[in-house]
Image: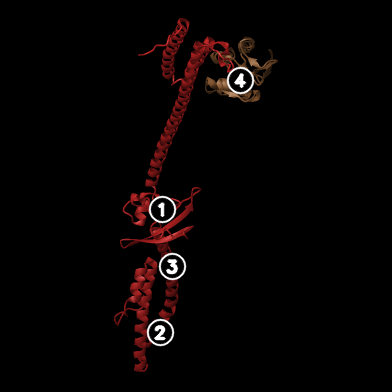
Amino acid sequence: MRIDTVEREGVACLHLRDGDALDVSTAPGVKVAALAALERGRDVVVDLSRIDFLDSAGVGVVVALVKTARSRGLRARFAGLSATARATLGLIRLDAIIDFSTDVDAAVKACRRRRDAEVG
Amino acid sequence: MARSRAIPPRTAAAASGAAETELADLCRLHDVGLDLIARIDDVDDLLDRVLEEYERRLADLPSDAFDATAERRGRVAEAKLRSLVMFATQAAAVKEKARAAAEIRARAEALEAANRRLAAALDTAEASRARLDGVLATLDAGILILAPDDTVEIANRAAAVLIGAPDERSLAGRPLPDGLSSAGLAGATEILFDRGGSPRTVLALRRGLPAPGGAVILLTDVTERWREMEERHRIERLREALWTLGVLSHRINNPLTAMLGRAQILKARRDVDPSVTRAAAVIEEAASRIADLIRELAQVVKEGRRESVDRILDSGPPAPGGSGVA
């Protein structure tokens, strides 16, 4: 899986290309890229719009990134969930625990709003 | 006779292992549930704990646990997934309750802050009202502050006295007293109040208040002012009358002196007809009376008292044989 990282308004946006699964084989790469952005003090948005399947490792990365970001006073958001991905996350009610965004723009705005609210 | 079904040893062991796993998960679920409930007052702490539990459980799941096409997940994996779903349901419910509780707390705090601001504003308003009452009480002028519907909101003691009310509190909340409720009371209007046989003239000045409306009426007792003004006018008129009287007296006195002198000469002559002597005596007497009157008027003019003028003018003619002009 190719991961393109784009900086927008202080937010590192990770676009997942060339693959439709966030699973045991691709999740570690995404986690490493996202943790690197968090290391640089950046909020992270992961674009899941091309992901059709998440296994427990993929869902585990989602949870781990949110947890790590929170522990550093940062934000990790996930955007553009497909119906299948949403069903998987809904099965384990993660959609009731974590906020997901419809697309990357909305996720970046949400990060900025939260950041401004915390600074203000 | 009961028949028992034989369970193959390996299947029985697997079933027993799954049951133990499920039981252990249920116990853990119970403990985690209690832990989550204990953190319900701190949403951030609760979320951290929930994520931690998610992470642990997801790490414990086989990677194909979410794959709907996986026909044989195995009973242990199935139990773990079921346990995860149960935990997730529990966590979502607790988180929702925590969010609702946080919102209620935030609203309660906002309400409490608003209450504090309201109480402070009321204190300020009461202090301002007390200060206003104090100021109004010191005023000699009557003040009526009216609501938009023309009922009295605030009245001071002077207003109650001028209107003839028992006290200022008896006016509050009531319609305007008669005489003041006139819609035409837009500018300054004089109103006569009869307070138990003691009529008072009160000048009422009405001014409208900005939104939400209402008005202020300023009441001033002008009874004494009017009386003093009338007295000044009366004195002025009297002074003019006395001056005129003085001039007249002086002008009358000169011909009167000549007339009286001639009458006395005629009366003293012996070579005239007796009828002339009698006529001269009548003229002398009348002239003497006029001279007396003029002398008294001159004295009044000198003293400047109107009562004396009235007394002289009202008195009857002096007794016969009055003195002549001095």
In the image, residue B91 lies at what x, y percent?
Answer: 47, 20
Q: CA distance from mark 1 to mark 3?
A: 46 Å
Q: CA distance from mark 1 to mark 4?
A: 64 Å
Identify the residue at the far left of this view. B319
In this figure, which residue is indicated by the disc labeled 2?
B262
Q: In this picture, is B210 found above or below B254? A: above
Label 3 is found on which chain of the structure?
B
Chain B drawn in what color?
Answer: red
Which is more foreground, mark 1 or mark 4?
4
Q: Which residue is at a point 65% across and 24% down the rendered structure image?
A: A105
In this figure, which residue is indicated by the disc labeled 1?
B151
Q: Estimate how packed mark 2 is, as few (under 14), some (14 to 19) or many (20 or more) residues with alpha carbons within 10 Å.
A: some
| Label 4: element kind | strand
Q: Amino acid at mark 3?
A: Arg
Q: Amino acid at mark 2?
A: Arg
Q: Are marks 1 and 4 on the same chain?
A: no
In the image, residue B143 lies at what x, y percent?
Answer: 41, 51
Q: Amino acid at mark 1?
A: Thr
Q: Estimate how packed mark 4 is, as few (under 14), some (14 to 19) or many (20 or more) residues with alpha carbons within 10 Å.
A: many
In this figure, which residue is indicated by the disc labeled 4?
A78
Q: Which residue is at a point 44% across and 32% down the rendered structure image?
A: B111
Give the quadrant of the C terminus of chain A: top right
Q: In this picture, is B185 found above or below B311? A: above
Q: In this picture, is B90 found above or below B292? A: above
In this figure, which residue is indicated by the disc labeled 3?
B237
Which is more foreground, mark 3 or mark 4?
4
Give the quadrant of the N terminus of chain A: top right
Q: Is residue B325 visible?
A: no
